[in-house]
Amino acid sequence: MHCPFCRHADSRVIDSRTSDDGAAIRRRRQCPACNRRFTTIETASLSVVKRSGATEPFSRDKIVSGVRKACQGRPVSADDLAILAQKVEETLRSSGSPEIDAYEIGLAILGPLRELDEVAYLRFASVYQAFDSLEDFESAITSLRAERDERAARDAAPPAAVEPAEQGL
């Protein structure tokens, strides 16, 4: 890392800390030539490859604005949308790839949005997955109902009996 003051080709790391959301590392550095200190912030870049082939930097704000339209009139707060965008970004970054296809971002949105609000999920999915007919909506609604019934059955089931530990072993 070049010193921003004297342009010396090297510097020494004095302190490293992760940022609040863990997406960046803040490093305090010192130049061995001029002894001045400076701070660097390191982040892993994530690019989005659009349908046209163009690339642009990933933006949580774009996730929030796209999902906000689907959530219009629904009981979803700005904090809920920010958390959803963070979950999506974490999912995408966990893939380890520096470039993500725009379609993959939409898929990553569907899961957390489904958990957040089923109506907003249907709105987003209908546009994203290009629903063409009522049958597409019926299929999505049937799937949502089956998942909800499954969850309710799991939550209502009594806990499994715990066998007492065998003695003398």
Image (spheres, rainbow, N blue to C red):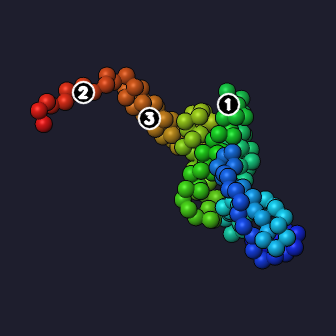
For mark 1, give the secondary structure. loop
On the question of residue 48 being in view, the answer is no
Crowding near the residue tagged with mark 1, few <14, some 14–19, many ≥20 C-alpha atoms within 10 Å: some
Q: Quadrant of residue 31?
A: bottom right
Indicate the amino acid at tag 1.
Val
The residue mark sitting in front, 2 or 3, is 2
Crowding near the residue tagged with mark 2, few <14, some 14–19, many ≥20 C-alpha atoms within 10 Å: few
Residue at screen point 61% across, 54% down: 105
Looking at the picture, does residue 29 appear above or below residue 127? Answer: below
Q: Which residue is mark 2?
A: 162
Task: Compare residues 115 and 57 and report the one nearer the observer.
Answer: 57
Crowding near the residue tagged with mark 3, few <14, some 14–19, many ≥20 C-alpha atoms within 10 Å: few
Residue at screen point 58% across, 64% down: 97
Is label 1 in contact with label 2 (beta carbons under 8 Å)? no
**Distance from the alpha carbon under mark 1 to that under mark 2:** 40 Å
Q: Which mark is residue 147?
A: 3
First along the sequence among labels 1 and 2: 1
Task: Compare residues 86 and 69 and report the one nearer the observer.
Answer: 86
Is residue 118 rendered to the left or right of residue 51?
Answer: left
Q: Position of residue 11 (x, y in %)?
A: 75, 70
